[in-house]
Amino acid sequence: MTSRKIPLETTMESPAAPPVAVAPAPVALPPLPEPMPAALVVETKDKIVAALHTVFDPEIPVNIYELGLIYDITIDPRTAGVHVRMTLTSPACPAAGAIPGEVKAKVQQVPNVAAAQVELVWDPPWDKDRMTEAAKLQLGIDD
């Protein structure tokens, strides 16, 4: 028996409360007639990264990818399903209810993606060391 990760969606109990993880019903995708070739998986992942560069935390003028909020992007070549592991700068982030949904929508718009699931995680916690050098320069953060 293999364990299966269940992606998490978030809801907000109140504006001041941290997001509460809710496990959605697992989505079973039908297999593709033929698995995606490795080159297509790489190309699709690059397009997903480009799409994530268009998602911003409303309080920070840097995209979530450069901020280091995206921990992992996995593409199943058998189904073209995408799993994104991400975090936010804080569990009390006011945009916690919106950003994961925007990530899911942007990823699902990428060609060759059958479906996307976003898992919001808090471990490991985000810190400024996850930011790219470009993001640190844009925000005036010196190491």
Image: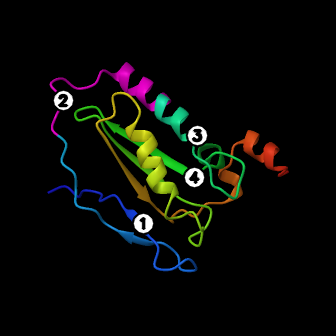
Q: For the magenta stretch, what is the residue range? A: 30-46
Secondary structure beneath disc 2? Answer: loop
**Do callouts 1 and 4 mark residues in contact (Cβ within 8 Å)?**
no
Report, in whole angstroms, how far the alpha carbon at label 1 lies from the one at label 3.
21 Å
Residue 118 spot, x, y in % from top left: 40, 53
What residue is at 18 percent from the left and 48 percent from the top? 28
Q: Residues within 10 Å of mark 2 (few under 14, many from 20)?
A: few
Give the amino acid at mark 3. Thr
Q: Is residue 37 left or right of residue 86?
A: left
Label 3 Cα crowd, 10 Å radius (few <14 / some 14-19 / many 20+):
some
Q: Which residue is mark 1?
A: 10
Marks 1, 4: nearer the viewer: 1
Element assignment for label 1: strand
Q: Measuring from the top left, give residue 69's x and y in whole percent.
A: 57, 52
Q: Position of residue 79 (x, y in %)?
A: 23, 35
Q: Position of residue 87 (x, y in %)?
A: 53, 58
Which sits in the foreground, 58 or 133?
Answer: 58
Asked if residue 33 is among those painted magenta in the image, a careful observer would answer: yes
Which numbered disc, 1 or 4, marks the residue that appears first in the sequence? 1
Sequence-wise, which precedes: disc 2 or disc 4? Answer: 2
For marks 3 and 4 on the same chain, the one whose residue lies earlier in the sequence: 3
Nearer-N-terminus badge (1/2)? 1
- For label 3, the SS is loop
Q: Which residue is mark 2?
A: 32
Task: Provide the residue designation for mark 4.
Answer: 69
Distance Cα–Cα, label 3 vs label 4: 13 Å
Q: CA distance from mark 2 to mark 3?
A: 29 Å
Q: In the rendered view, does 65 fall on the left or right side of 11?
A: right
